[in-house]
Image (tube, rainbow, N blue to C red):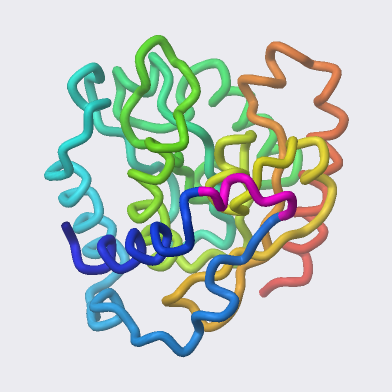
Amino acid sequence: MNQSNKKNLEFIINSGVNYFLQDSPRNWFEHEKKLEQSDFNKNTGDKKTQIDEVIKDLKKHNSSLQKMATKLVVYDGNLNAKVMLIGEAPGRDEDQQGIPFVGRAGQLLNKMLLAINLQREDVYITNVVNWRPPDNRTPNDEEILEFLPFLQRQIDIIKPKFIFLLGGVAAKAILSTPLALGKLRGKWHEYKSLNLEQGIPTIASYHPAFLLRSPQYKKHSWEDLQMLQKKLKNVS
């Protein structure tokens, strides 16, 4: 296992798997700022090189999901993006093409971005889990934990100004909470990392696939997007 992955995973395990049972969003790294920096920070390569290393490690990682999926799905978009969008896991279309958010949910996501004057090429898009779960089922806690170190490495490499979480799985992984999305959305949270000096403002909202099934929630999603748009106006 990559040393950075190992360090992050050890920290997660030492924190206790029951962190998903916390009744409020938790910053895992709040008291860990002074920990010895991982080998990740010794990597002076550019972002593309570092992301390619993550992809290489994902390909080498032996996951049970891989046996039932077609293609590894890691990211799409801009490596220098100010906004990172994190979804749940690949669906059928993503599994076939190897690109996140390319099906109907992806088309809706593109429209959502356009509504706040963003192009797909302006943002970095990824998922919590990088292989399609069987029958598009929701990733379980073990699978979230399994792929979380790879997601954390992507965040550390991209260093986005803001993180926009799409759906409950992404909120659980990044905010470490079982709270319902309805209680998390509409406010800013903070993601902290061992490898970043400052926390990243983070907002949780509904997954586009959910909005396709329940269009009555689109107005809430629009409110969340407007919150992001307002923040972006104040960032150079």
Q: Is residue 23 magenta?
A: yes
Count of marks overlaid on the render: 0
Q: Residue at x 73, y 41 (%)?
A: 179
Q: Residue at x 45, y 41 (%)?
A: 128
Give the quadrant of the N terminus.
bottom left
The one nearer the camera, 57 or 116, is 57
The image quarter containing residue 58 is top left
Q: Which residues are magenta?
A: 18-24
Residue 8, percent from left and from top: 36, 64
Q: Is residue 96 left or right of residue 138?
A: left
Residue 143, percent from left and from top: 38, 36
The one nearer the camera, 64 or 103, is 64
Give the quadrant of the C terminus.
bottom right
The one nearer the camera, 14 or 199, is 14
Report the residue that reaches farthest toward the left.
60
Residue 166, percent from left and from top: 62, 38
For residue 208, above or below residue 235: above
The image quarter containing residue 94 is top left
Residue 219, percent from left and from top: 87, 29
Q: Is residue 102 left or right of residue 18?
A: left
Q: Is residue 29 magenta?
A: no
Q: Residue at x 22, y 19 (%)?
A: 70
The image quarter containing residue 140 is top left
Q: Residue at x 44, y 30 (%)?
A: 89
